Image: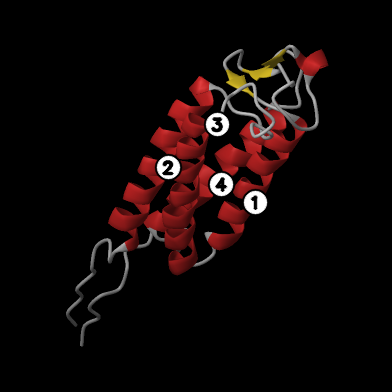
């Protein structure tokens, strides 16, 4: 007899969509933690809890605050948790990507020097949110399907 429609898994027993969601989640946790490290974050002494007044820059490029770093860590933890199942991993990638696309639009609409920029974001963040959002949605849609089927005949 054979099995049809079994998602491809590696040596770990995880599907590709799970591995990708775990990797993205881990990167988000790492980025959130790096936002708290002086040197990796320039103007670290200007790191505010919330708002556009935080002039700290992760890697000297991306505007961050304590809240921004915490959000990255939480999004990463969500990815690690949801990657336990293929459906959870797929949902994390798709809906997490949608959230990042909404953040991209939000960053384009608000004034970067306004109170509405409470996370905060700058133009580099906006471009990153576009690429992250689009990439996560595409990965979720492509990898979340039946990746590959193993057809085994006895």
User: 57 and 87: which one is in front?
Assistant: 57
Q: Position of residue 65 (x, y in %)?
A: 72, 28
User: Circle 3 sits on which residue?
Assistant: 110
Badges 3 and 2: C-beta atoms under 8 Å apart?
no
Badges 1 and 4: C-beta atoms under 8 Å apart?
yes
The vertical placement of 141 against 57, above or below, is below
Query: Nearer the viewer's eye, disc 3 or disc 2?
Result: 3
Q: Quadrant of the C terminus?
A: bottom left
Q: Earlier in the sequence, mark 3 or mark 2?
A: 3
Query: Nearer the viewer's eye, disc 3 or disc 1?
Result: 3
User: Circle 2 sits on which residue?
Assistant: 133
Q: Earlier in the sequence, mark 3 or mark 4?
A: 4
User: Circle 1 sits on which residue?
Assistant: 77
The vertical placement of 20 against 8, above or below, is above
> Which residue is located at x 45 percent, y 38 percent?
105
Label 1, label 2: how far apart the Cα atoms are: 17 Å
Q: Position of residue 96 (x, y in %)?
A: 49, 51
Q: Quadrant of the N terminus?
A: bottom left
């Amino acid at each position: 007899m054979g099995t049809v429609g079994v998602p491809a898994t590696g040596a770990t027993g995880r599907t590709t969509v799970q591995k990708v969601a775990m990797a993205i989640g881990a990167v988000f946790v790492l980025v959130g933690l790096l936002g708290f490290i002086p040197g990796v974050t320039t103007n670290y002494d200007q790191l505010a809890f919330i708002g556009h007044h935080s002039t700290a820059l992760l890697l000297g490029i991306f505007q961050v605050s304590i809240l921004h770093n915490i959000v990255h860590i939480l999004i990463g933890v969500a990815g690690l948790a949801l990657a336990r199942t293929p459906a959870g991993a797929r949902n994390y990638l798709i809906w997490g990507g949608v959230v990042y696309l909404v953040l991209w639009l939000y960053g384009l609409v608000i004034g970067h020097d306004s109170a509405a920029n409470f996370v905060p974001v700058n133009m580099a963040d906006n471009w990153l949110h576009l690429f992250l959002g689009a990439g996560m949605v595409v990965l979720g849609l492509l990898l979340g399907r039946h990746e590959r089927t193993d057809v085994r005949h006895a």
